[in-house]
Image (tube, grey):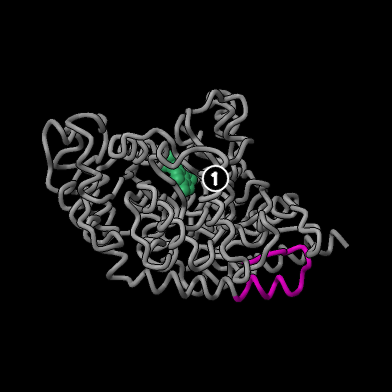
């Protein structure tokens, strides 16, 4: 047992077991549980369940807790705000924290063009609204998305999402005029080529698409994650976004970058697009780690584009809630004061070193990849065949969980393990987590032998 990862009961422990039985009676099955343990409290990168088990959190509420669980500055800001007022609907009675947050995000967004912001609640809502804004601005209907993309579960966001099971099956018909092309997935290049000799065939495919499938005149926007998250932390090669940007510009198509999972320091810069050849998106979707766990999302975009939808055409009752906006302002402060961007790079370097060490030892680790602290391993049956091995990813989640490390899977085939640990994780906690991954992999390899 480790100092931080301490599982002292069977999972679930007796108290969790009781509550989970109640959950099964009253909470719909779609809300299935990853960890069979009910949380009691959390701090930084560690949480404890109601049976006294503690876990190192490599999931961060699915990428939401870059500043950690319950950071004191954010907690204080939330407490102070709820005592003043909780809700007004900004469009009815405005408040300062939303305006301040818009100013800070507009100034921090990549690229020289002046920006404006709009706020929403969830990532999917930011995506829905970015698409609406792009349609309004261009007067066009088509949206191009990518294989392995994930943009959320509402109608447009689900239509843009790539993975069929569990996200799309039985939920059609999907939004019209959504088109999909392969992403820059170098480990499994659609064109069988190798970077850099490939001539970025995946980016050139966009031009070909305008010959084979739809006129660029019909296309409002291309939407892309700078690094695909749910898809398995797929990092496009240098030059990819530059070429996509050039093709979009040539045809008057907007580039929407979905930074919902990559934003707020996850990749070592505030936004991942800062590392993509200096490309400036027209619109950017943000959510998840923006407000340390309170529901808040946003679209940050070029002023001229953001201002095109007229009065009340976008919005909603709860959008840009003041408690969440206060939290977000303190998240930005904490990223700066605790130097979490360089910390993200350091975490990423250590994870990459450890995971590539495991890859040298185990042939079932096909690929280790990532950007900043966004690092993943992809599991395969064999290095040559690259046949996806989702059972190994599942076994690693389970084995690590029993040892007190919470891991999440990713990949359209479910055969990747991704790290979304809070960036406030200490070196000691990080090393303990890496040791657990190592021990778990050894156990899996021994069973397979
Ligand atoms: C890149 C990306 N976009 C959008 C979403 C949807 O966000 P939400 O679940 O908050 O609707 C997610 C969620 O995982 C995401 O990773």
| Residues in magenta, as a range | 353-368
Q: Residue 250: horizontal and vertical position, in percent?
A: 38, 53
Query: Residue at position x 64%, y 36% from top?
Result: 165
Query: Residue at position x 32%, y 43% from top?
Result: 296
Direction from residue 368 to residue 338 in the image, left or right:
left
Direction from residue 317 to residue 90 in the image, left or right:
left
Task: Name the one closer to the observer, 32 or 371.
Answer: 371
Instruction: Decide if residue 318 is in sight here.
Output: yes
Instruction: Decide if residue 15 is in sight here.
Output: no
Assign a secondary structure to mark 1. Answer: helix
Q: Residue 236: horizontal and vertical position, in percent?
A: 53, 61
Exactly how many numbered labels are in the figure? Answer: 1
Q: Residue 36: horizontal and vertical position, in percent?
A: 61, 43
Query: Residue at position x 56%, y 46% from top?
Result: 181
- Say whether residue 35 is magenta: no
Q: Say above or below: 61 vs 243.
A: above
Say which quadrant the N terminus sits in. Answer: bottom right
Please identify the residue farthest to the front as the structure is shown.
Answer: 211
Judging by the rendered image, the residue that carries numbered circle 1 is 209
Query: Residue at position x 26%, y 36% from top?
Result: 319
When asked about the image quadrant of residue 86, the answer is top left
Q: Say above or below: 49 vs 90.
A: below
Please identify the residue farthest to the right as the structure is shown.
Answer: 449
């Amino acid at each position: 047992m480790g100092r931080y990862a301490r599982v002292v009961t069977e999972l679930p422990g007796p108290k969790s077991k009781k509550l989970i039985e109640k959950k099964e009676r009253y909470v719909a099955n779609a809300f299935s549980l990853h960890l069979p343990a009910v949380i009691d409290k959390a701090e930084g990168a560690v949480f404890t369940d109601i049976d006294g088990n503690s876990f190192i959190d490599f999931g961060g509420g699915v990428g939401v807790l870059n500043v950690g669980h319950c950071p004191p500055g954010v907690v204080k800001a939330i407490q102070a705000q709820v005592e003043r007022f909780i809700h007004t609907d900004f469009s009815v009675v405005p408040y300062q924290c939303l305006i301040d947050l818009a100013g800070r995000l507009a100034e921090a967004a990549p690229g020289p063009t002046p920006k404006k912001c709009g706020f929403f609640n969830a990532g999917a809502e930011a995506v829905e609204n970015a698409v609406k804004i792009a349609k309004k601005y261009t007067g066009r209907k088509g949206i191009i998305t990518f294989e392995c993309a994930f943009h959320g579960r509402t109608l447009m966001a689900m239509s843009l999402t790539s993975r069929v099971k569990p996200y799309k099956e039985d939920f059609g018909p999907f939004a019209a005029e959504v088109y999909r092309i392969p992403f820059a997935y170098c480990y499994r290049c659609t064109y069988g080529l190798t970077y850099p000799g490939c001539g970025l065939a995946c980016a050139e495919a966009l031009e070909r698409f305008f010959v084979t499938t739809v006129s660029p005149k019909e296309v409002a926007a291309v939407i892309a994650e700078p690094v695909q998250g749910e898809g398995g932390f797929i990092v496009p090669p240098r030059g990819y976004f530059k070429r996509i940007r050039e093709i979009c510009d040539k045809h008057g198509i907007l580039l929407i970058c979905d930074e919902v999972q990559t934003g707020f320091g996850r990749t070592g810069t505030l936004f991942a697009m800062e590392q993509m050849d200096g490309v400036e998106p027209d619109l950017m979707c943000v959510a998840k780690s923006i407000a340390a766990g309170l529901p808040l999302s946003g679209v940050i975009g070029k002023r001229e584009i953001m201002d095109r939808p007229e009065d009340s055409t976008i919005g909603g009752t709860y959008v840009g809630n003041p408690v969440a906006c206060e939290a977000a302002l303190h998240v930005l402060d904490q990223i700066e004061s605790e130097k979490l961007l360089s910390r993200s790079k350091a975490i990423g370097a250590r994870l990459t070193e450890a995971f590539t060490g495991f890859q040298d030892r185990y042939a079932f680790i096909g690929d280790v990849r990532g950007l900043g602290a966004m690092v993943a391993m992809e599991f395969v049956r064999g290095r040559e065949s690259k046949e996806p091995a989702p059972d190994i990813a599942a076994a690693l989640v389970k084995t690590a969980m029993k040892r007190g490390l919470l891991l999440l899977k990713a990949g359209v085939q479910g055969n990747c393990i991704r790290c979304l640990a809070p960036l406030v994780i200490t070196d000691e906690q990080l090393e303990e987590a890496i040791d657990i991954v190592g021990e778990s992999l050894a156990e899996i390899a021994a069973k397979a032998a």
